Image (tube, rainbow, N blue to C red):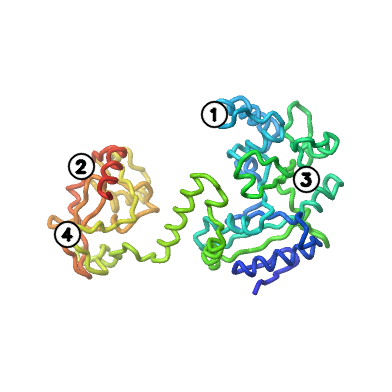
Amino acid sequence: MSTKKDHLNWVAENLEEFLSVTSEIRAEWRFDSEDVSGPWYRGQQRKQWKLWPNILRIGCCDADTEDEIREEFAIRAPALSRFESMPTVDWDLYFLMQHYGAPTRLLDWTESPVIALYFAVRDNPGYYDSSVWVLNPYELNRRVIKRGEVISPSAVGANPKDCKPVARWLPPRWAGRMIPQSPVAIFPTHIARRISSQKSCFTVHGREADGFDRFMKGARPCLKKIIIPGHAVKGIRLNLKDYGIDDTTIFPDLEGLGRALATAYKDAKTDSPHRGVYVRIKPSSLHKEGVGVFAIRDIPKGTRIFAEENEEVFWLSKELLPKNPELRRLYDDFAIIKGDRYGCPTSFNRLTPAWFMNDSKKPNTRCDESYDFYAERRIPAGQELTIDYSSFSDEPEPSEKRNRRRAKKTK
C-alpha cells in the first residue's frame, strides 16, 4: 500500500501503488479523468537530486556563456545534422540543443507517469531510492505568467501575441536582457521521434537554480514527489517491461534496441551475483601475517578465474612513485615489482582478488598477455591460488590488439 509521508511526498513500492498515487494527485489537482491534459512527470535516479537543467549541473549558468553555446550550436550543427534543414525558429533550435545534449535551461518532463517511472528506475541498481516528481504545469504558469495554460511557442500558426509571455526565457541575444527568475512550462514541437515517443514537455529555468522551491510551499503546492525505495526498483522495472515499457519504446531507434538488450542481460546477471565467482580472500597459508586467495569451489583446468574483471595494469618507473610513505606502501604491498618498474591497478580503490594472490615458482594459475588469469590445473576447493609474478610482461600489448585477441577467444 502506498504511503503518504506528508502533503508533498509519497512512497510507492510497486507499479500498482505508483499509479494509485498519480491518480490521487490528479484528483487533488482536479484534473478530469477523461481530460487529455494533466500533470507532468519527471523521473530521477536518485531522490536527492535537485530539479536542475544540465546547464546548471555543469556550472555554466551565466547568460553570456549560454548565448555563446547557442550561437556555436547554430553555426556548427547544420554540417552534422541528419535533417534536410535546420530549425529556423529560435525555440525549435533550443529544443534540438536539448535533444542532443547541449547545455540548456530546459528540463525534460513527460505527460506519461509510466515513462517518468521508467527513467527513475532504469539505471538504478537498487542500492538507493529513486523519485518521480509530479508537476501541475497549468498552476505553475498561472503563478509565473498569469495564464493558466501551457503555450507551444514554436507551433505552426501560433499567435505571436500568445507566445510573447514565454519569449523572455529564450537565451539572450544582446547584453542587458534579463531572464525571469522562476521556471515556466512550455510544450515543444515534436521535431524528433524521441520527443514524440517520450511525450516530452519542458520547463525552462529562469535565473534561480532552485526556482521550483517556492512552488512546493503553501497550502496549494503545484509540485509533489513520489519516492521509489531502492528495494522496489527491480520489481518495478520488470513490471514495466511486462507492459511493454523499455528502451525500445522510449528510444525508437537502434540505440534504444541496444540499450534494451543491455538492460535485459544486466538484470539477468544481477539475479546471480555469485555467477563466475570461484574464490575469496582469507589469511594466507604461505605468509603468516598476510592474506591470500582461496578456491571456494573446484576450479577446472583452463577456467578463466576472474571472468568479470576488466582491470588493466599499467607500469610506473620507480622514480615516479609518491614520496608519501603510506602511499608508497600501497605500491610495495600490491604492485607487481619487476626491477625498477611497478605494475599497478588503475586505482588502488578498485583492487580485485587477483591482486591478493601470492607468488610461487610452482603456481597453479597463469596470466596471459591480457592479464587474464586461468587455472593451470584443476584447483580443488580450499586450495590457495598462486601466480609466478616473474612471468608478467611489463610491456603489455596495445589495447587494440588485446581487444581483438579477446574477441577471438570468445567466438
Q: Position of residue 167 (x, y in %)?
A: 79, 36
Label 2 sits on a secondary structure element that is loop
Task: Identify the residue under disc 2.
Answer: 339
- Closest to the observer: 374 or 283? 374
Task: Measure the alpha-carbon separation of dots 4 and 2.
Answer: 24 Å
Task: Identify the residue under disc 1.
Answer: 80
Q: Position of residue 51 (x, y in %)?
A: 67, 51
Q: Amino acid at mark 1?
A: Leu
Task: Measure the alpha-carbon separation of dots 2 and 1.
Answer: 51 Å
Res. 364 mark: 4
Quadrant in the rendering for residue 153: top right
Q: Are marks 4 and 3 in contact (CB under 8 Å)?
A: no
Residue located at (66% from left, 58% from top): 113
Q: Earlier in the sequence, mark 2 or mark 3?
A: 3
Mark 4 surroundings within 10 Å by alpha-carbon count, few (fewer than 14), some (14 through 19), many (20 or more): some
Q: Amino acid at mark 4?
A: Asn
Q: Earlier in the sequence, mark 4 or mark 2?
A: 2
Q: Amino acid at mark 2?
A: Gly
Any part of residue 48 in sight = no
Q: Position of residue 401 (x, y in %)?
A: 27, 38
Task: Measure the alpha-carbon separation of dots 1 and 3.
Answer: 34 Å
